[in-house]
């Protein structure tokens, strides 16, 4: 046959998992698909002019608009560079029921024949052909969904059984063989605490919670003390963040939303310390996302750093104009000694940002002595602790429990309501797809495709929110059952205040105090954080 008369073919090969691609032999799935397509094209007398292979790309999870191979093939089709799109099976093009049928239609409408080695040519000459085309991908999507459910279910079963699902162990743990085998008889690893790394993990949590150190200060501390990661390199920002987030350090194995019951022998950090670390992360994150000028009453402040000798770190405000008080140092102050000598020191103070930097009008006092303000704050905090010792413990705990529980339940209810609304919308849109195929819908297929994609994104977001709030609610009872420990800690902080370092004092004040507003003549107004305000209101 003359080459001029041969039909030009573009081949598409795809595998969903990297495990299906093994370059060490010739038996991987891509090689199999390629061989089958070449043999089929030869029998038909076609000429293969282009080939595209997607390695480890899910046709169920990844949209066609995000797949480079599909986009390249569509551009080539529009430019008439080939006549036939050939694949091993049609599901290599995709497995998304709301999208792939329309991708198939696009090629055919643009004059490209679509062939499969195993299923022949796909035609769309009638409404029946269109319906069969849609049904094929509806079935393929269903199979992918079932596979996904089976995989997730098995992983969840492994996690909830208290077994390690695999992968490199985090800092503080090591892999060991304890006799478990998989279905092929191969040894499986379990996880246990690594005593050589336990102190590293404890140091990171304690520096973060008790001394208010940020990620970079923790890294600096570890480096200066000769503590490095397993590769002998300096810890990095994301590594510290990951350590502080992992529930594994309180003995809970996890994968996605799946959580095991606490495994005592795996716990390195006590529950209270871990929960405090999460609160600090959330608080610092909310402050970072809050625009300048936001009312301080709307933000719970945990200091971003605890450097320096001043007790207030980000929670001091001018009582007149509401701007933040910042630390400043004046010129050298000269002190004459009795022996005739002199000494000099820097004058440190809290100053009103608006007034000193001329950012806004303020008729209040310009600056406040750090020593005087800190003394007043310390005296106020000590008085709070003394007062709370005379209250009935059970009353405080019951009020705190109800407030936190009600908050979590409200968030979960709202998230589930959104999820139900978007799920109903998706069902309606999917019903319109069949009508569109039969020419009975007032909506264009492309419009339906976009609407379905948008609705699925909303469902995904609502599901993530609902899962997160459900997880918070599930863990709230355990957390609130330990609220007595918070109470005991609260009444003991007054004693700690006299002996602990400045960094710990800053953190205690940050936990308790939302804002300290200073006005002329050192008139002070302190607002407590909501979490502790309940205790003191009850007292």
Image: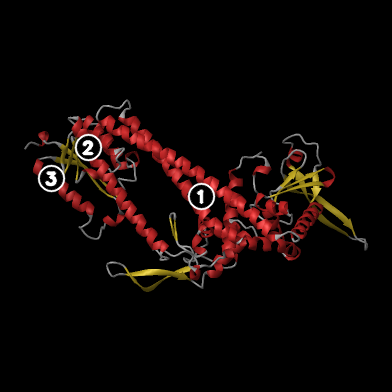
Label 3 neighbour load within 10 Å: few <14, some 14-19, many 20+? some
435 and 5: which is toward the camera:
435
Residue 196 in the image: x percent, y percent? 51, 72
Q: Along the line of sight, which residue is nearer the eye, 308 or 256? A: 256
Q: Position of residue 323 (x, y in %)?
A: 72, 41
The answer to whether the residues at label 1 and label 2 have Cβ atoms under 8 Å apart is no
Residue 133: mark: 2
Tell me: residue 141, above or below residue 398: above
Residue 347 screen position, x and y as percent: 80, 52
Asked whether disc 2 touches disc 3, contact meaning CB atoms under 8 Å apart, the reply is: no
> Could you tell me which residue is drawn at 15 percent across and 38 percent down?
121
Mark 1 and mark 2: Cα distance apart in space: 40 Å
Residue 346 left/right relative to 438: right
In the image, which disc is placed on residue 313?
Answer: none
Q: Is residue 373 left or right of residue 324?
A: right
Residue position for label 1:
469
State how many labels appear.
3
- What is the spatial separation of the Cα atoms under label 2 and label 3, in whole angstroms? 22 Å
Which of the labelled discs sits on residue 40, or is there none? 3
Q: How is the image coloured?
A: secondary structure
């Amino acid at each position: 046959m003359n080459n001029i008369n041969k039909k030009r073919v573009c081949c598409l090969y795809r595998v969903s998992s990297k495990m299906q691609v093994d370059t060490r032999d010739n038996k991987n799935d891509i090689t199999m698909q390629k061989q089958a397509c070449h043999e089929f094209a030869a029998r038909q007398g076609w000429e293969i002019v282009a080939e595209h292979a997607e390695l480890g790309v899910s046709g169920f999870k990844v949209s066609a608009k995000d797949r480079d191979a599909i986009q390249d093939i569509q551009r080539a089709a529009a430019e008439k560079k080939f006549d036939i799109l050939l694949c091993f099976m049609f599901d290599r093009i995709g497995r998304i029921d709301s999208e792939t049928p329309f991708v198939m239609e696009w090629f055919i409408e643009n004059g490209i024949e679509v062939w499969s080695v195993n299923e022949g040519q796909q035609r769309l000459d009638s409404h029946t052909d269109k319906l069969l085309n849609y049904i094929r991908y509806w079935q393929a999507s269903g199979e992918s969904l079932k596979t996904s459910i089976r995989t997730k279910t098995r992983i969840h079963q492994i996690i909830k059984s208290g077994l390690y699902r695999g992968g490199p162990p985090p800092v503080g743990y090591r892999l060991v063989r304890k006799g478990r085998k998989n279905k092929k008889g191969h040894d499986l690893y379990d996880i246990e605490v690594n005593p050589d790394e336990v102190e590293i993990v404890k140091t990171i949590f304690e520096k973060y919670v008790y001394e208010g150190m940020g990620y970079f200060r923790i890294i600096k501390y570890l480096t200066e003390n000769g503590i490095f990661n397993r590769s002998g390199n300096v810890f990095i920002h994301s590594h510290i963040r990951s350590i502080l987030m992992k529930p594994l350090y309180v003995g809970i194995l996890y994968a996605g939303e799946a959580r095991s019951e606490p495994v005592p022998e795996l716990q390195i950090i006590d529950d209270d310390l871990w929960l405090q670390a999460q609160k600090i992360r959330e608080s610092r994150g909310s402050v970072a996302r809050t625009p300048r000028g936001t009312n301080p009453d709307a933000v719970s402040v945990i200091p971003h750093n605890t450097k320096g000798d001043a007790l207030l770190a980000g929670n001091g405000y001018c009582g007149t104009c509401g701007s933040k008080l910042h630390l400043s140092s004046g010129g050298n102050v000269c002190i004459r000694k009795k022996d005739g000598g002199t000494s000099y020191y820097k004058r440190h103070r809290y100053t009103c940002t608006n007034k000193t930097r001329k950012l806004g009008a303020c008729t209040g006092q310009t600056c406040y002595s750090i020593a005087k303000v800190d003394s007043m704050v310390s005296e106020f905090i000590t008085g709070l602790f003394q007062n709370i010792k005379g209250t009935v413990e059970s009353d405080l705990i019951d009020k705190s429990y109800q407030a936190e529980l009600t908050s979590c339940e409200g968030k979960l209810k709202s998230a589930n309501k959104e999820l139900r609304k978007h799920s109903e919308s998706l069902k309606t849109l999917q019903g319109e797809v069949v009508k569109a195929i039969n020419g009975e819908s007032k909506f264009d297929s492309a419009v339906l495709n976009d609407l379905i994609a948008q609705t699925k994104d909303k469902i995904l977001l609502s599901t993530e929110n609902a899962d997160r709030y459900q997880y918070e609610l599930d863990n709230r009872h355990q957390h609130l059952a330990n609220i007595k420990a918070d109470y005991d800690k609260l009444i003991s902080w007054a004693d700690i205040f006299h002996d602990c370092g400045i960094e710990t004092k800053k953190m205690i004040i940050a936990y308790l105090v939302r804002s300290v507003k200073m006005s002329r003549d050192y008139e002070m107004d302190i607002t407590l954080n909501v979490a502790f305000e309940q205790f003191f209101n009850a007292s």
